[in-house]
Amino acid sequence: MSFEKKLDKTKIPNHIAIIMDGNGRWAEKHKRERTFGHENGIKAVREAIEGAAEIGIKFLTLYAFSTENWNRPKEEVYMLMNLMVRSIENESKEILKNNVRIKSIGDINRLMPETLFSLQKIIEESSKNTGLTVVIALSYSSRWEITEMVKNIAEKVKNNEISIENITEKIISEHLSTYFMPDPELIIRTSAEKRLSNFLMWQASYSEFAFIETLWPDFTKETLFETISDFQQRERRFGKTGKQVKDEQ
Ligand code: FPP
């Protein structure tokens, strides 16, 4: 039976974030260049977006390129930036037709002008869509984001717009680049690596983690549904006892 049928439709997470990992190893397995792995990763991006839209997830965040990824060989960085442009252009019709809204988080000023242009274009064109929001984390890292948030709040304190006593967790969340969405209930990382790698560190405080074996290019809708089905079996306690959680239900 498909895992989609097993899903409890009343317990679909609002926000899932994915660390797409294993493109290089997938290419190696197929005796091809790393770039072949990234090309095939796009198919998996499509699967993840379609699957998420199908079951009514509100936000899907995809870690496409980290601050640290800028340190990869120049050719690979260039290839990835071009791949993003091509994918966004190829998929834009489908994105708009399917009422998907695209947003991004990260230091986009570092992007190549062509990448920045196509990203901003699709963000603008899809801004009124009301279905699934796909958030592309591009040139993103949590430490970058937290540093920006501190600078931003410090500036407001200096200008007497916020007093130190009024800085709360809520104020901090509102000054992060993810201010427009809830924290992810579930973070998936493919390729059996068990690390957060500078991704959504503040937002992941109470997230469930799924570290799955699948290499990113092999990720399908079915992989997504199976992972969510496993997530639905877990009890999320947020620091409370199991009994307290049951009594509240
Ligand atoms: C990790 O595999 C993957 C990346 C660094 C790139 C992922 C980006 C895409 C699939 C493109 C996304 C595009 C859009 C438009 C969202 P790796 O190279 O680290 O694999 P390895 O650990 O096996 O070497």
Image (cartoon, helix red, strand yellow):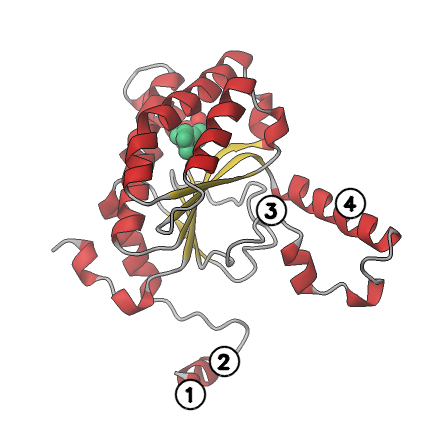
Mark 1 and 2 residues: CB-CB less than 8 Å, in contact?
no
Task: Kindly identify the amino acid type of the residue bearing the numbered disc 3.
Answer: Ser
Q: Earlier in the sequence, mark 3 or mark 2?
A: 3
Q: Is residue 237 visible?
A: yes
Q: CA distance from mark 3 to mark 2?
A: 32 Å
Task: Kindly identify the amino acid type of the residue bearing the numbered disc 4.
Answer: Lys
Q: Position of residue 242 (x, y in %)?
A: 44, 80
Residue, disc 2: 241
Q: Residue at x 37, y 67 (%)?
A: 234
Q: Secondary structure at mark 2?
A: loop
Q: Earlier in the sequence, mark 3 or mark 1?
A: 3
Residue 90 drawn above or below residue 123: above
Q: Nearer the viewer, residue 122 or 178?
A: 122
Q: Earlier in the sequence, mark 2 or mark 4?
A: 4
Residue, disc 1: 247
Q: Residue furthest top?
A: 75
Q: Earlier in the sequence, mark 1 or mark 4?
A: 4
Mark 4 and 3 residues: CB-CB less than 8 Å, in contact?
no
Query: Is the residue indicated by label 4 positioned so its CB lies within 8 Å of ligand 1?
Result: no
Q: Secondary structure at mark 3?
A: loop
Residue, disc 4: 151
State which mark lies toward you, 2 or 4: 4
